[in-house]
């Protein structure tokens, strides 16, 4: 237990089921004290439904505290531009790779840190009124993370000594299903799944849902997947794919995932931590 009083209490808002429930529970006075604000770390590559849900959360009379958006720009654009540049280093997303010798591998996961955690940290510094290098006293910011009991293994200590982490859904023993029940009981909409459109952790159920219910977003994602294998100027010789089958997205057989009992590798919303 940390007894230092934080200068700022922020709720890390992924805009999925868990963090939405946490924010609305705070609004109902079921979690105290009230956070000063929420921060949505935006990769600018979420489904339209997530942005619509976020817009609702930010509309008057939903939450009694402000929601800030923190971003370093578009992850999709970064993926596409890196292909056309000569100075790239590593894959920013943990793509499924076929190495030159035919063996399989994964790209490094830099997207979580670069496009979620860093903008979140910069926004917290901005709210504290300090620049990006200034020293901050220990435990100055309390960060609420939306991790539920069914994913407790994802809880991690704060990365910065000036942050202290709180897990309100763990404290109140809420699973993802409990969160959905809470939302329904209070007549709130159940939020869509929050994660990047082309996240390589998607299960086939998510890919199928995207293909069948959001044809425009599916077409756009297929296009990014195709572009990833063109004009690679980074000196890396492997071939990268979004899908774990390591074939182009529009050639995947998505019809029998349930029959094969495929596990969902990304059963949790991103929530700023991408399942880490
Ligand atoms: S949702 Fe996936 S692609 Fe997006 S930042 Fe998280 S791990 Fe990376």
Image (cartoon, grey):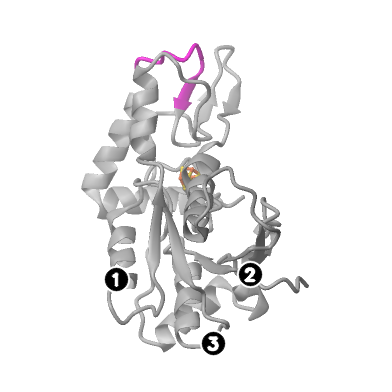
**Considering only order in the chain, which callout, 3 or 1, is on the residue closer to the N terminus?**
3
C-alpha gap between disc 2 and disc 1: 29 Å
- Residue 230 image-quadrant placement: top left
Percent position of residue 256, x then y? 43, 48
Q: Which residue is at a point 34% across and 79% down the rendered structure image?
A: 62
22 in relation to 69, above or below = below
Look at the image and give the residue range highlighted in magenta: 229-240
Asked if the stretch drawn in magenta spans residue 231, the answer is yes
Secondary structure at badge 3 equals: loop
User: Which is nearer the eye, 188 or 215?
Assistant: 188
Q: Earlier in the sequence, mark 2 or mark 1?
A: 2
Give the left or right position of residue 172, taking residue 58 as reference: right
Count of all numbered marks drawn on residues in the image: 3
Q: Can you give x and y, in whole percent of width and height, for residue 92 in the image?
A: 49, 32
Is residue 208 in sight in this rendering?
Answer: yes
Q: Given this view, does label 2 or label 3 mark the residue nearer the observer? A: 2
Q: Is residue 181 above or below residue 201?
A: below
Within the image, what quadrant is residue 32 found in?
A: bottom right
Q: Label 1: which residue? A: 56
Give the residue drawn at x 53%, y 35%: 94
Q: Which of the labelled discs sits on residue 30, or is there none?
A: 3
Q: Residues within 10 Å of mark 3 (few under 14, many from 20)?
A: some
Work out which residue is located at the far left of the displayed protein and give it: 216
Q: Residue at x 44, y 43 (%)?
A: 199
Q: Are marks 2 and 1 in contact (CB under 8 Å)?
A: no
Q: Is residue 271 visible?
A: no
Name the magenta segment's main secondary structure: loop
Sequence-earlier tag: 2 or 3: 2
The label shown at residue 6 is 2
Q: Nearer the viewer, mark 2 or mark 1?
A: 2
Q: CA distance from mark 1 to mark 3?
A: 21 Å
């Amino acid at each position: 237990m940390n007894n230092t009083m934080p200068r700022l209490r922020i709720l890390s808002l992924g805009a999925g089921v868990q963090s939405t429930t946490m924010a609305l529970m705070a609004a109902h006075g079921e979690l105290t004290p009230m956070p000063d604000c929420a921060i949505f770390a935006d990769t600018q590559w979420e489904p339209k439904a997530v942005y619509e849900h976020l817009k609702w959360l930010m509309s008057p009379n939903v939450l009694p505290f402000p929601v800030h958006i923190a971003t370093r720009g578009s992850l999709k654009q970064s993926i596409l531009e890196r292909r056309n540049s000569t100075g790239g280093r590593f894959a920013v997303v943990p793509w499924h790779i076929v190495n030159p010798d035919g063996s399989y591998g994964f790209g490094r996961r830099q997207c979580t840190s670069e496009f979620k955690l860093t903008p979140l940290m910069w926004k917290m510094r901005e709210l504290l009124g300090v620049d990006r290098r200034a020293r901050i006293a220990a435990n100055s910011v309390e960060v609420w993370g939306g991790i539920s009991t069914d994913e407790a293994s994802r809880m991690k200590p704060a990365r910065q000594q000036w942050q202290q982490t709180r897990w309100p859904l763990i404290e109140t023993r809420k699973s993802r299903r409990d969160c959905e029940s809470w939302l329904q009981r209070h007549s709130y909409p159940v939020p869509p799944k929050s994660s990047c459109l082309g996240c390589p952790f998607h299960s086939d159920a998510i890919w199928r849902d995207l293909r069948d219910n959001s044809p425009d977003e599916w077409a756009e994602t297929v296009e990014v997947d195709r572009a990833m294998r063109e004009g690679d100027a980074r000196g890396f010789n492997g071939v990268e794919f979004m899908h774990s089958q390591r074939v182009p997205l529009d050639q995947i057989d998505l019809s029998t995932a349930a029959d094969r009992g495929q596990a969902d590798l990304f059963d949790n919303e991103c929530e700023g931590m991408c399942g880490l």
